[in-house]
Image: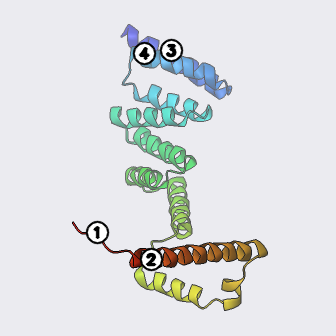
């Protein structure tokens, strides 16, 4: 009983500090409450909110998950799902945030904020998926190849002066090598083969 009173005292202190926007200090008070009673849903929920305000998003999600796991209170659970959805949206983890909003709406179908945020997350996810390049099928690749082949020959054949010179040099080099081979063949063919 004494422990429960201490937890409630820590929660009241944390709430007061939270209202004063002293989020770091409120976190310390909520953490004290959680040390005494790790499964306390309200302490986890409030700690999640303070972590969110301090931009500690992963910690906030952990707190909301602990709240969901440790409460039978439908309203607290619904709020935890909703807040988890907000955090996940902020992290651009849209599929997960959509699931969190859906869970919140299952618990309270009249929550307009959850419905609006769900619609926003769904629209954002759809937009993201449209921006991502889709894997190309064979026909699409074939069409692209044909388009490339149809480019004007001028563009394909344009070479700068350096490239032309390099090509000429390499051709001359190859010609010399061919000449050498021809000469060496002529010399070797006049000599009799070795008899083994």
Estimate the x, y position of residue 179 in percent, counting from the top left: 56, 78
Give the residue drawn at x 46%, y 75%.
Answer: 187
Quadrant location, the N terminus: top left
The x, y position of residue 126, in whole percent, is: 51, 67
Front-most of 183 and 115? 183
| Vertical side of 168 occupied by 121: above or below | above
Residue for point 57% across, 17% down = 13
Q: State how far apart marks 3 and 1 are (Cα).
A: 108 Å
Tell me whether the residue at label 3 lies in contact with that at label 2, contact meaning CB atoms closer than 8 angstroms. Answer: no
Which label sits in the foreground, 3 or 1?
A: 1
The residue where tag 2 is placed is 185
Q: Which mark, by number, is residue 9? A: 3
- What distance separates the C-alpha of mark 1 from that of mark 4? 96 Å
Q: Would you call the spot at circle 1 few (<14 residues within 10 Å), some (14-19), or many (20 or more)? A: few
- Label 3 environment density (alpha carbons within 10 Å; few <14, some 14–19, many ≥20): some
SS at mark 1 in the image = loop
Q: Which of pointers 4 and 3 lies earlier in the amino acid sequence? A: 3
The mark closer to the camera, 1 or 4, is 1
Q: Which residue is mark 1?
A: 194
Asked whether the residues under the numbered discs 1 and 4 touch, taking CB atoms below 8 Å apart as contact, a structural biologist would say no
Q: Earlier in the sequence, mark 1 or mark 2?
A: 2
Q: Quadrant of residue 28?
A: top right
Q: Is residue 177 visible?
A: yes
Tell me the residue at 51%/43% (across/down).
83
Q: Earlier in the sequence, mark 3 or mark 1?
A: 3
Residue 8 visible, this angle:
no
In the rendered image, residue 114, in percent from the top left (x then y), is placed at 50, 54
């Amino acid at each position: 009983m004494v422990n429960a009173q201490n937890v409630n005292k820590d929660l009241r202190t944390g709430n007061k500090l939270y209202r004063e926007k002293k989020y770091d200090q409120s976190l310390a008070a909520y953490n004290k409450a959680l040390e005494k009673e790790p499964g306390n849903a309200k302490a986890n929920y409030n700690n999640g909110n303070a972590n969110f305000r301090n931009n500690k998003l992963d910690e906030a999600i952990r707190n909301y998950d602990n709240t969901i796991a440790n409460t039978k209170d439908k309203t607290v659970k619904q709020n935890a799902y909703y807040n988890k959805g907000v955090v996940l949206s902020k992290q651009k983890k849209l599929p997960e945030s959509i699931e969190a909003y859906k869970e919140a709406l299952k618990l309270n179908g009249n929550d307009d904020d959850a419905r609006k945020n769900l619609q926003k997350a769904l629209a954002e996810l759809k937009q993201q998926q449209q921006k991502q390049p889709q894997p190309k099928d064979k026909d699409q690749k074939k069409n692209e190849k044909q388009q490339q082949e149809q480019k004007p020959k001028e563009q394909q054949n344009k070479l700068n002066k350096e490239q032309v010179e390099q090509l000429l040099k390499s051709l001359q080099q190859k010609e010399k090598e061919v000449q050498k081979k021809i000469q060496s063949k002529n010399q070797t063919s006049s000599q009799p083969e070795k008899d083994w």
